[in-house]
Image (tube, helix red, strand yellow):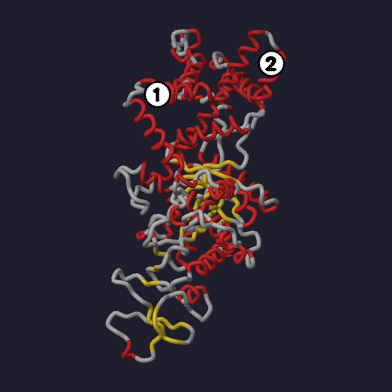
Amino acid sequence: MSNFNQEMDTIATLREAAGSAWKDINPEYAARMRLQNRFKTGLDVARYTAKIMRQDMAEYDADSSQYTQSLGCWHGFIGQQKLIAIKKHFGNTKKKYLYLSGWMIAALRSEFGPLPDQSMHEKTSVPALIEELYTFLRQADARELGGLFRELDAAREAGDTAKEQAVQAKIDNFETHVVPIIADIDAGFGNEEATYLLAKKMIEAGACAIQIENQVSDEKQCGHQDGKVTVPHADFLAKIRAVRYAFLELGVDDGVIVARTDSLGAGLTKQIAVTNEPGDLGDKYNSFLDGDYINSADEIENGDVLVKANGKLLKPKRLQSGLFQFKKGTGEDRCVLDCITSLQNGADLLWIETEKPHVGQIGGMVNRIREVVPNAKLVYNNSPSFNWTLNFRQQVFDAWQEAGKDVSGYDRANLMSVEYDDSELAQTADDKIRTFQADAAREAGIFHHLITLPTYHTAALSTDNLAKEYFGEAGMLGYVEGVQRKEIRQGIACVKHQNMAGSDMGDDHKEYFAGDAALKAGGKDNTMNQF
């Protein structure tokens, strides 16, 4: 980031060269505006954040305690507030990202209204949300720097040189709110050309990391629902290459591709893979097909499909939908093959969609992958689709039972009950939930932990609480006590919502442009002064 004085000197030189026509241009004001708008394009953002992510990946490889985290977003304001909160509470944004969830776009951002996570929403809404998120993050930069410029002016006016120098140092060392976004492209919204075109739009909007899954585009399902259908590896790898070409075309040479496999919960395929010789990738994919070996043409019925496998003729089981089944119990083996294949063909990170948060299960697969690709690492969905309380209480119950500890005081099927909340088992389970991310980073190769849909749930929860109080006996106190007073006590910037929406920045600009003639909103009668 340029030094404040350097920017002023640069613009002063430009003003001098322009002559009297620029006499009313103040170099310091222009320099302030430049610093408040550090990233001019989405590609600037993508290149900057890709370098951050690559550095974080290298640091994780050296030390697995250095994992990264993010929370899912469905609106620019939500992403902005997360980063403002992160800077407030932790002092910096290191190893904290944002996640853009296809599920939340489908549920909350489609012109069709709420939709299931089946790639039915407008594909253009994905890059549009990336652009929106970065617009809000850049505005957070401008707002915070604007506050520092006001402090600088006040220090100068008071003749406080030490304060002026301290504020100047804060400006010169300002840390942006702009962080990497891992963006969900679903299954690519079509063939590999469609994937490439959408990936370009996402990268141009600022995405440095694109997550793509190995489901069929037109049969795509949420990772935690039934009926998932995968594609042969050749189809998926073509889409990975399409994303890489998009990164390279746009000059984001270190863009990150996250290859997601849904094979653990996907029991179906739409296609039988092309295979040219025994043991090739297509043959390996087909080896998981469920079916019957046949010995004669009499065993073939109208419409049956045959595949040569293991030197025999296999008749795969075909459903009325035309889909083919995989053998039961082959999910983990297929996941491992998917992951190794993706990493060997251009992917940078993996995503294994699981049915429960279990370090042992994830780590077992990762260890097998790392036998072939030693630095394999995962992005993992700490999903709200899991009942975390029940899952971990049951894990503790099972571990205690296996260790011979008396668990007769607990009903395993009813461990979610509030009656167990203060029990030793519940406290042990909560401790395991608390350390899950660190444990999984250390033992299961998870580089990045995310929660896909947190603000979907927090918005619903907080709205339910406010509605209950405000429309009930508490009346206006329901808002004042439950919202505004907490905002004030906790120093939530949005209590000054006019400032958050850009009113003060607008006043600054009016002064730059019109001088003493500017009509400003932030005078003594502005009610925001009450805060």
Q: Which callout, 2 or 1, points to the residue nearer the camera? A: 1
Q: Is residue 516 above or below residue 360?
A: above
Q: Are marks 2 and 1 in contact (CB under 8 Å)?
A: no
Q: Tell which circle, 2 or 1, labels the residue nearer the N-terminal end.
A: 2
The secondary element bearing badge 1 is classed as helix
Residue at x-position 38% and y-position 29% = 466
Whether residue 245 appears in this view of the structure is: no
Residue at x-position 51% and y-position 58% = 352
- Label 2: how many Cα within 10 Å (few below 14, some 14–19, many 20+): some
For mark 2, what is the residue? 163
The secondary element bearing badge 2 is classed as helix
Residue 264 image point, x, y percent: 47, 64
Whether residue 530 appears in this view of the structure is: yes
Residue 198 image point, x, y percent: 43, 50
Q: Quadrant of the N terminus?
A: top right
Q: Is residue 73 above or below residue 486?
A: below
Closer to the camera in the image, 97 or 43: 97
Residue 255 image point, x, y percent: 56, 50
Closer to the camera in the image, 171 or 382: 382
Q: Quadrant of residue 465?
A: top left
For mark 1, what is the residue? 479
Residue at x-position 53% and y-position 51% = 247
Would residue 279 appear left or right of 109 to someone viewing this image?
right
Residue 354 image point, x, y percent: 49, 58
Closer to the camera in the image, 443 or 346: 443
The three-letter amino acid code for the residue at tag 2 is: Lys
